[in-house]
Amino acid sequence: MNIAVRYYSKGGNTKKIAEAIAQALGVEAETVDRPLDEKTDMVFLGSAVYANGIDESVKRFLRKNADNIGTLYNFSTAAIVPSTYQQVKKVADENGITLSPREFHCKGSFLFLNAGRPNEGDRTRAAAFAKLARQDAE
Ligand SMILES: Cc1cc2nc3c(=O)[nH]c(=O)nc-3n(C[C@H](O)[C@H](O)[C@H](O)COP(=O)(O)O)c2cc1C
């Protein structure tokens, strides 16, 4: 079972979750600028919401790496929006990528909202999500 963690993070919130997931799975968290160089069974992809949308670089990662993604697992942070799942699913569907129904989302700090998030509890829940997803895929 090979596993990769990729993320896009402007402010560091999604990066914190990416690192918790990567640590739980014993891999490195890398940004979406790093392509997948081989077919990868489980790809955990982290994104956030900026003016209601996911960053273009997340969409580009999906388009460019579609052939190397076995199953995609979405994780995200945002101030208000409950998940990036539907936005990622749209691009996944357009590119023939299988997106797991399993996902992780937590609040991310923004201006005066959600101070301190993601926090230790969020990172613990993200790690548990990743381990459970791997367990079920094995
Ligand atoms: C320019 C900008 C626009 C944002 N727009 C939204 C938004 O429309 N809806 C929302 O829920 N959060 C919005 N946020 C909050 C981010 O989604 C939240 O802070 C997220 O955790 C950022 O992740 P990052 O630190 O990994 O970049 C916005 C943040 C920024 C910086």
Image (cartoon, grey):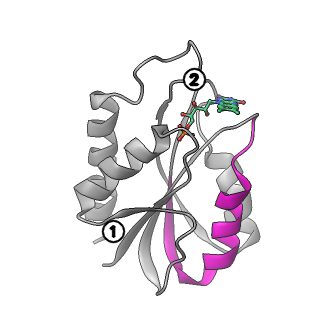
Which residue has dot 1 on it?
Answer: 137
Ligand 1 within 8 angstroms of badge 2 C-beta: yes
Callout 1 amino acid? Ala
Identify which residue, 49 or 71, lies in the foreground: 49
Do labels 2 and 1 touch, CB within 8 Å?
no
Q: Secondary structure at mark 2?
A: loop
Of mark 2 and mark 1, the one earlier in the sequence is 2
Q: Label 2: how many residues lie within 10 Å, few (<14), some (14-19) or many (20+)?
A: some
Residue drawn at (72%, 62%) of the image: 91
Q: Position of residue 109 (x, y in %)?
A: 51, 24
Q: Quadrant location of the C terminus?
A: bottom left
Indicate yes or no whether the magenta region holds residue 59: yes
Please report the residue visible at 57 percent of the width from the left and 23 percent of the height from the top: 110
Q: Quadrant of residue 26?
A: bottom left
Residue shown at 29% from the left, 66% from the top: 27
Q: Residue at x 58, y 43 (%)?
A: 10
What's under tag 2, amino acid-wise? Phe
The circle drawn on residue 38 is none
Tell me which image quadrant ligand 1 sits in.
top right
Q: In the rendered view, would you say 95 is above or below 112? A: below
Q: Which residues are magenta?
A: 52-74
Is the N terminus in the top left, top right, bottom left or bottom right quadrant?
bottom left
| Separation of residues labelled 2 and 1 (CA atoms) | 34 Å
- Please say whether residue 50 is one of the residues in the magenta stretch: no
Q: Is residue 80 left or right of residue 74?
A: right
Q: Answer left or right for 133 relative to 25.
A: right
**In-image side of 44 versus 128 (left or right):** right
Q: Position of residue 46 (x, y in %)?
A: 51, 52
- Residue 129, position as x, y percentages in the image: 33, 48
Q: The residue tagged with tag 1: helix, strand or loop?
A: helix
In the rendered structure, find residue 110 and report the number of the disc placed on it: 2
